[in-house]
Every structure is written in C-alpha cells, then in structure tokens.
Amino acid sequence: MKLASLRDGTRDGRLLVVSADLSEAALAPYVTLQAALDNWEEARPQLEMAAEALATGRMDDAFPFDAAACESPLPRAYQWADGSAYVNHVELVRRARGAELPESFWTDPLMYQGGSDGFLGPRDSIDIFDRNWGTDFEAEVAVVTDDVPMGASPELAAERIRLIMLVNDVSLRNLIPGELAKGFGFFQSKPASAFSPVAVTPDELGGAWDGRKLFGELRSSLNGALFGCPQTGQDMTFDFPQLVAHAARTRSLCSGTIIGSGTISNRGEDGGPGKPVSEGGRGYSCIAERRMLDKIETGDFKTPFLKDGDTVRIEMLDDAGQSIFGAIEQTVAEVERR
Amino acid sequence: MKLASLRDGTRDGRLLVVSADLSEAALAPYVTLQAALDNWEEARPQLEMAAEALATGRMDDAFPFDAAACESPLPRAYQWADGSAYVNHVELVRRARGAELPESFWTDPLMYQGGSDGFLGPRDSIDIFDRNWGTDFEAEVAVVTDDVPMGASPELAAERIRLIMLVNDVSLRNLIPGELAKGFGFFQSKPASAFSPVAVTPDELGGAWDGRKLFGELRSSLNGALFGCPQTGQDMTFDFPQLVAHAARTRSLCSGTIIGSGTISNRGEDGGPGKPVSEGGRGYSCIAERRMLDKIETGDFKTPFLKDGDTVRIEMLDDAGQSIFGAIEQTVAEVERR
C-alpha cells in the first residue's frame, strides 16, 4: 500500500491511497495520515480495501497522481529523530578533520532529535536567507512507527514499523560547527526536512524490505547529474529496529514517530571511502561527504555547497525501473527576510 | 483565560476552560488545545466567551476542576524546544567541572530540540527502569506559540506567544555526559517532560507577564520540603521573544510550538551562586545545581538524585497565595521492563 498527503489548504493535508506505479490516486477513507496511524489496527484494513479498489479500477473518483501537489506524507509530525546508521559517513567526516572515530560509534547509535513541526513538501523549494549557511542535502531512508513502549527490544520495535519513506534531511553545514561546539546538538543547522511523495507499507516493498533494512539504490542527482547511488542495504551498521529501540530506551514513542537512517553511505570496493560516480564509484548522498574526499585527496574543500537555483533529486527505482517512493525534487531559493 | 486538557482516553485529551482560582472547569468549545491553537483567531473569542460564562456562573455544565485528572495542556505537541536562558545555571554547572563559560553564551542562546511526541500529565509518575540513570527534575517556564515565520524578529515573536505554562523537564543526569560526548545533544537523557495542569494566556497574568518574561517565585519542593524559590523574572539573560526568534532563525515554527526557558536559577545576593533555602537563599530548581554547589564547597557531590518514591512539586503562587498554573506533582517510580 502506498499513501500520500494532498496539499489541500489544511495543516495536515488530505490522505490519498496511491497506485503501486504512482499513476493514480484516490481519497483515502481516513482524512489524515496521523489519524490513520493513531488508529492503525482499524485504519489499515480500510485503507487496504481502498488501495485494492484503486488497483482493480473499481474506484470511481480516482484521479492522476501528482507528486507536485503533495505535502510530505506527514506534513508535520510529533517526532522526527534521525540516526546516523551508516558509520562510514561519520568516519569520513571525522577523518577529514583528523579526528579519531570512537570505538563506541560501532555499537551505540548516534541519533539527534529533529524538528518535526513542519516539513517541506517533496517538491517545495528550500528557502534560505543566506548563501553562506552552506546548504546541503542528505539522502536518507526513514520509517514511521506506531506506538512503541519504553524499553522496547529491537524485535518489538520491528513489529511497530508501519511505513517507509525517503528523506532529504536539509542541513546548513556552516552553522553546524558553532552549534555543535555549544554542546546541545543541532538546531538552527537543521531546518525543515522533506520526505518522498509517498510512504510505503513494508509488505508492498516485497524483497526490498527484510523487516530491518531497505535494499535498493538510492539515487541522488544534483542539477540533473547523478551524484550518488549507494545501496541502502549495505554498510548500515544499525538497522531500523535497532534505531527505533535506541529512541525508545528511556521513553515511549507515539504513533507517527519518524526515525531516520542518517545519510546513506557505502564504502569503496577497497574498503576505503567510496569514489565519485564519475570515477565509477557509488558517489555520495550529500555534498559534505564529497568535500571530505576533496579535503583528504587535495587538502582543500573544492565541491561547493548548494546555491540559489540548484536542484536536488532523490529517488529509488525498483528492478523494473519504476520509482518506488516518487522523487523528492527541490530547488534552493535565496529569499528575502520579510 | 486558563486552559487544561482532561484525560479522556483520547490521544489529545478534551480541552477545558478553567476558572481563575482553579476551582471549576467546563468543556471548551474546541475539542483539543492543538485544534484551538491551529485556528487561534477564531478560537480565542469562543474560548473567552466560555471562560467568561464560567467565571460568572452562567455555565450549566461546570464541574470541580481536578488537576490530577488532567494531561499536560498539550498531551503531545509538534515541537518542544528548550532554551537555557538562565546563564547562571550553565555557569555553575561548568564551574563545578572546572570549565570556562564561553563569552558567546551571554549573547547566543543555548537551545536543544526536545522530544514532544508524548508528555507526562502533571500528576503522572516519572517511570524509570534504572536508579542509576540519575533522575532529576528541572523547574522551568515555557510559552506556547502560534505560527512564527522563519526569520522572525523578537518583536514579531513576542506577538505570537499565546500561552504560558510551567514545566518539569525531567533529566537523566548520568546519561548526559556520554550522550553529549557523542556530539549530537540530548536524546535518551531527556525523557518525557510534564507541564502544569493549566496553560494561561498572557492577559490573564496581569503584571506577572510583561510580554517578555514571567515574574514570580517558582517554588520547587522535594518530598514536601522547599528546595528552590527563585524569581523567574530575575537573571533571565534571554527573554522569551529572543528564545522564540532564536528557534525561528532558519525555519518557521508551527502553532503549538513550546519554547522553554531552561532551569530557573538566580545568583546569590553577592553575585555568586545562590544559597540553599535552608541557609536563607533562593535554593535551586534542580538537584544538579545543588550538587554543583556541593562539589564547589566540599569537593564531593553529596545531594542524591531522585530515587523510587521521591516526590517533586513545582508551583507558582500569585500575591494572594493562589496557585496560578496549578501544581506539577510527580513521584518517581522504578518500574520493571515489560
């Protein structure tokens, strides 16, 4: 089952069921995705009936699906917590500044509490006031959970995963060092994220989801050129049930909680940092990682961060070349302070 | 106007208008506080009419107000961001470990993104699995905002403050050093917070609110003994409009965003750290601060953190001795993992 939220002038959008090939949609029997998640046991069979009717041409009011008319599946959420499960990414960032990776990073997940009060739509512009903020994208995978009790094991957490999405975790790189130096984590350096047009149930993903990880090539393009195509099932040190259990260690999680994987990052074939796409590698899911390679190789950060007018596209295709989650496609816009 | 959320088996509670003296309540014309905040221009006059009817005995279905039957005013929220506006508190914590306070801490607010997907009710137990977590309370003040545009000035932010509440920002002190060392801020060390039984509009506070700060004595008691009674209007380096503007620097804030002051902390009369209540001082709004004094004075942390059965009470009284926000009163309970 695939679900989306139509932008309809309300704060939480209008829930849609979407066909597997993303060609058609219909109004769902629940008004909002949060309402469905709050009552998933009852909502799920009703949503499945609607999805089935859509798939078999029995939905009278079906209409063409338009990702550009959508909000993020949850236009706002009660929780967005982002892990950093691809430790290769963390190691690379540290290596570029000559810092060691603590051994514990391989056993204790990194996770930060993100802002969840308003997400960008998958085709919304990324509005910034200042090009010197160092705007970057981060292509990730995220899951949406049902209620998770405090202290839940990874096994229990696995049973509470309801939906899978893609994310662009927009980051303002030049604000990060100052903010992290203050010791309280990210805040201004992590503005609103954007999620893929559709959220997908685990069963719909078939072999691409094994209950713990998503398997597929996450394609990030910058101004039309492929920038990264790592395998999401590879080099993921902590799987989603582990990340959810980490989040629930000292408190319960509410239905509609979104837990992210962190930037997808594969090692190179030699076990070192991966090569750029142009050199036959799998490239990078954010500009910062490319810059770390610049620094390691040349001593300088060469690749620029995003500027006004730059467009990022993030997508995953199935074996038949069909987009699974729809594409996040966002253009940076330098705007005036009002 | 005073508002509360009755625990009614739903996820967001049932909005109540509450009399100024907290003796009576009635169902509000909006079902939930979030729904009212999402539509404040329309909701406000309707809620005021209900509050006025309650105040003048014209509300037929009024009933005695029971803080113990309440959720936090927002049982869950889209955002909870906590500042650290009483720099005295930060300075003391740093001094105890021999660290300097960076000069920028006086001009650039500290703020962390807190978990907002589920708050404890004002009389709920604080459930912990492990006494070694070092459970502590933090007595604070918080505001609830309407929508705030990205880049809002403190002046604009001030106009968007809708409600004021008290907070117990529960903290697991022994998890903090390890978590902050990882560099991504608090996560497991900040379990669910609890808010005062009622949230109060600025106009209702009269002279206790000047549009920027709350003025009053915030009384924290531990097992019935007064532990702290600092003045909230004193030593607040960053006022609420500044904290809200800080949060909105790179992204807009959604209606129902909660912004906290951080632990209330007054300097002593000599300009140094304040004295305990037992020595005629204003005491402390968290145990950690008392322990810092222990450490500075004796070289050891003497005052223990909260243990199973300990009760914390947080309240503010008006000049007539009447509770303004109702009392947060919570008992720590060591519970078994399920």
Image (tube, coloured by chain):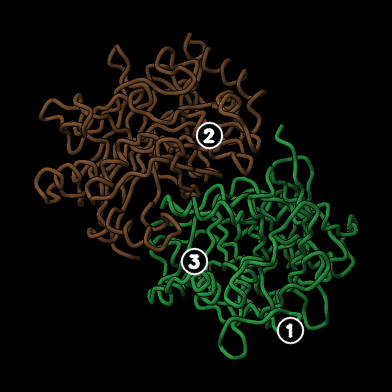
Chain colours: A brown, B green
Q: Identify the residue position indicated by label 3 in the image.
A: B244
Residue at 61%, 26% in the rendered image = A156
- How far across and how far down the image is residue A189, in percent? 36, 55
Which residue is at the far top? A56
Q: Label 3: how many residues lie within 10 Å, few (<14), some (14-19) or many (20+)?
A: many
Chain to which the residue tagged by mark 1 belongs = B
User: Can you say whether B196 is above or below B218 in the image?
Assistant: above
Find residue B279 and name its label. Answer: 1
Q: Secondary structure at mark 2?
A: helix
Type of the residue with mark 2: Val
Report the residue marked by disc 2. Answer: A244
Which numbered disc flags the more N-terminal residue, 1 or 3? 3
A237 vs B270, left or right, is left
Kindly report the distance in space between the C-alpha atoms of the residues bearing marks 1 and 3.
36 Å
Q: Amino acid at mark 1?
A: Glu
| Residue B158 appears in the rendering | no
Residue B264 can be seen, yes or no: yes
Mark toward the viewer: 1 or 3? 1
The kind of secondary structure element at disc 1 is helix
Given contact means CB atoms under 8 Å apart, are the residues at marks 2 and 3 in contact?
no
Classify 10 Å Cα crowding around label 2: few (below 14), some (14-19), many (20 and above). many
- Residue B189 position within the rendered picture, expressed as x and y whole percent measured from the top left: 57, 51
CA distance for labels 2 and 1: 46 Å
Residue found at x 26% / y 44%: A331
